Image: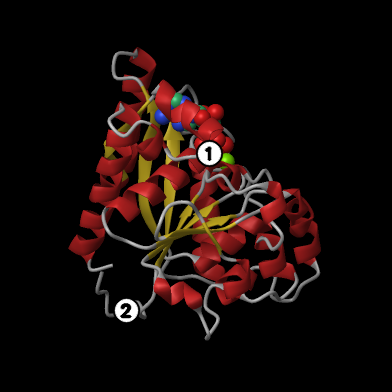
Amino acid sequence: MSDPTRPPGPKIISVANQKGGVGKTTTTINLAAALVELGHRVLVVDLDPQGNASTGFGIEMDDRERTTYDLLLEDVALQDVILATDIEDLAIIPATVDLSSADIELISNEKRSFLLHDALRQTDMDAYEFDFILIDCPPSLNLLTVNAMIASHSILVPLQSEFFALEGLSQLMLTIREVRQTGNPNLRIEGVVLTMHDARNNLSQQVEQDARENLGDIVFKTRIPRNVRVSEAPSFAVPVLAYDSTSKGAIAYRDLAKELVANNAAVGA
Ligand code: ADP
Ligand code: MG
């Protein structure tokens, strides 16, 4: 990861799609775990008031004393909001439902779109201990998501293999274009990943064909299959890689991590 145009420090990736239930949180959790398996140190930022990423890593409500909300709106220092998880080299900034009011509270803040950017680049910055920061975005294109996009080097878009999957993408791409114009000119698309894919299903095949035709190279070769082990893992508060290491879901997320790392090495990012 030696891009001369990028200062030293972690590669920051937002996992975003304004549609709910497309696999953002699942991808954040399992990609993070897979990157750790490859030897990287990863910080997950839970930017969704639903706090599903925090729950997925087993962070109890009682332990969410300082959260993404405090980082953004209470000037709490970065090192004071980062929590260790049960997985070595994997840390999280947890979220609670408090974050649901942040979108409104941010509006009156002069630096409203840059708060996460600045928070992740504090000079006494523990974040430099990380190789990757993955931001789990809320299902909306609100100010929280704009904060994530301004703070990030790239966006990873989970695309659920279902009817109308591609329809929401134009709105997302428009927002990315606006963010490039207003504050983050170098924002890249890390890639689009097909989630909940079923290779035997005509609809899944059609979505894949449309995505590859319309979006070309930015679609990851790796597809994440629909796999019941993936959906069971959160109730055991672990990534599927830990819950069932040889499941199809675990294997796919490992492949995705390898592909992502290889892409980054190829472009020197
Ligand atoms: P989002 O964060 O975009 O709202 P989630 O990651 O929470 O989406 O996923 C929505 C639902 O789909 C969850 O119940 C999750 O367990 C399930 N799910 C996600 N990916 C898969 C998969 N590959 N196979 C089976 N279920 C999945
Ligand atoms: Mg989610």
Q: Quadrant of residue 131?
A: bottom left
Q: Which mark is residue 203?
A: none
Classify residue 256 by image quadrant.
Answer: top left
**Quadrant including the C terminus:** bottom left
From this viewpoint, which residue is outermost toward the bottom?
123
Q: Is mark 2 within 8 Å of ligand 1?
A: no
Q: Is residue 173 visible?
A: yes
| Circle 1 residue | 237
Instruction: Name the one closer to the observer, 238 or 146.
Output: 238
Q: Amino acid at mark 2?
A: Thr
- The three-letter amino acid code for the residue at tag 1 is Ala
The location of residue 5, given as percent across then percent down, is 32, 79
Question: Is 47 on the left-hand or right-hand side of 125?
Answer: right
Tag shown at residue 5 = 2
- Mark closer to the observer (2, 1): 1
Mark 2 or 1 closer to N-term? 2
Circle 2 crowding by C-alpha within 10 Å: few under 14, some 14–19, many from 20: few
Q: Is residue 212 visible?
A: no
Residue 99, given in percent of the width and then of the height, sits at: 73, 54
At x 52%, y 67%, the residue is 151
SS for dot 1: loop
Quadrant that contains the N terminus: bottom left
Image height of 78 relative to 140, above or below: below
Looking at the rendered structure, the number of numbered marks drawn on it comes to 2
User: Which element is circle 2 on?
Assistant: loop
